[in-house]
């Protein structure tokens, strides 16, 4: 239970990619506002100017027109047309669009899922130094999607992105060291990378760093420090960490026992779809029942 780890779902990459695309397009020819704002506020004349610029191979305009078709702004939503314009911008070296194309192909929403095509565009953007693409390429190698399964390559790309400060890559690299995948097992290095990501606000890294403190892996055991990181992760609504918090309240050595609080956390985890918390909840409720029926509690109730 302590070692629970979840890779960030693709939806998060997609949202990030669209946001970056909008900013990138804005920075090209519509500086000062996001591309979405411009697309929403532009009149017909301005939008036609954008279309003309895209036809003349302006990469920023091509990217913005792709956004228009993907978002359905000024035109009917049309993913096939969006892909056409994204590919044109990507072929002109727009690294953000290369990454976004890769995400679309990896996710396969509204277009045919194609891991090979995703890998192709991630590799293009990764070679140009784009950290999110380097991280996602590492994940493709780790999963064997669109490229041969290769943990050494996965660790390599995670480290390249991690050294640029990408928190998802830092979390993934920490996991690789933690589990000896593609790199020698090294808990101290795992802690280094988990901490870097945790300090940037990665809820997964905050949880994993807390686990390291509970176990004393790569750091001195410290349940108080573990709970501090668990609380930071929980504050972001990361449901798996509720189970880790509950376990500390149920089984911790330095942490005061509090089965009522553990129960509250486990109920919350189950409400968020974490069914693995159910056996722990049963244990917790059995303990609360024993406490309620203990001679001390019964005597106290009689005296009242």
Image (cartoon, rainbow, N blue to C red):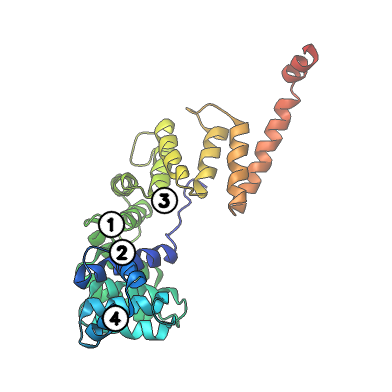
Residue at (27%, 63%) from the top-left corner?
33
The residue carrying mark 4 is 45
Across and down, in percent, residue 142 comes to 37, 67
Q: Earlier in the sequence, mark 2 or mark 4?
A: 4
- Circles 1 and 2, Cβ within 8 Å, touching? The answer is yes
Look at discs 2 and 4 and give the one toward the viewer: 4
The 10 Å Cα crowd at callout 4, few under 14, some 14 to 19, many 20 or more, is few
The residue carrying mark 2 is 135
SS for callout 3: helix
Q: Earlier in the sequence, mark 3 or mark 1?
A: 1
Q: Nearer the viewer, residue 223 or 198?
A: 198
The residue carrying mark 1 is 166
- Circles 1 and 4, Cβ within 8 Å, touching? The answer is no
What is the CA distance from the residue labelled 2 to the residue labelled 3? 15 Å
Q: Earlier in the sequence, mark 1 or mark 4?
A: 4
- Circles 2 and 4, Cβ within 8 Å, touching? The answer is no
Q: Earlier in the sequence, mark 1 or mark 2?
A: 2
What is the CA distance from the residue labelled 3 to the residue labelled 1? 14 Å
């Amino acid at each position: 239970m302590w070692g629970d780890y979840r890779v960030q779902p693709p939806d998060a990459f997609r949202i990030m990619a669209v946001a970056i695309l909008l900013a990138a397009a804005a920075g090209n020819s519509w500086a000062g506002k996001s591309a979405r704002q411009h697309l929403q506020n532009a009149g017909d004349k301005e939008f036609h100017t954008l279309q003309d610029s895209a036809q003349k191979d302006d990469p920023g305009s091509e990217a913005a027109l792709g956004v228009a078709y993907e978002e359905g702004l000024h035109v009917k939503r049309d993913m096939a047309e969006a892909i056409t314009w994204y590919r044109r911008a990507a072929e002109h070296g727009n690294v953000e669009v290369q990454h976004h194309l890769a995400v679309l192909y990896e996710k396969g929403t509204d277009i045919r899922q194609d891991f090979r095509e995703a890998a192709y565009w991630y590799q293009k953007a990764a070679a140009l130094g784009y950290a999110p693409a380097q991280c996602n390429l590492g994940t493709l190698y780790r999963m064997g999607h669109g490229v041969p399964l290769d943990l050494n390559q996965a660790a390599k790309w995670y480290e390249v992105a991690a050294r640029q400060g990408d928190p998802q890559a830092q979390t993934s690299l920490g996991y690789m060291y933690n589990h000896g995948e593609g790199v020698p097992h090294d808990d101290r290095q795992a802690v280094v990378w988990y901490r870097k990501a945790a300090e940037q606000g990665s809820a997964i890294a905050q949880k994993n760093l807390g686990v390291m403190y509970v176990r004393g892996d790569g750091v001195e055991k410290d349940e108080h420090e573990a709970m501090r990181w668990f609380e930071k992760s929980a504050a972001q609504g990361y449901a798996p960490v509720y189970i880790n918090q509950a376990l500390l309240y149920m089984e911790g050595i330095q942490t005061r026992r509090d089965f009522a609080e553990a129960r509250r956390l486990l109920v919350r985890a189950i409400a968020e779809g974490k069914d693995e918390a159910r056996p722990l909840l049963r244990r917790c409720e059995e303990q609360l029942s024993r406490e309620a029926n203990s001679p001390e509690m019964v005597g106290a109730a009689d005296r009242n």
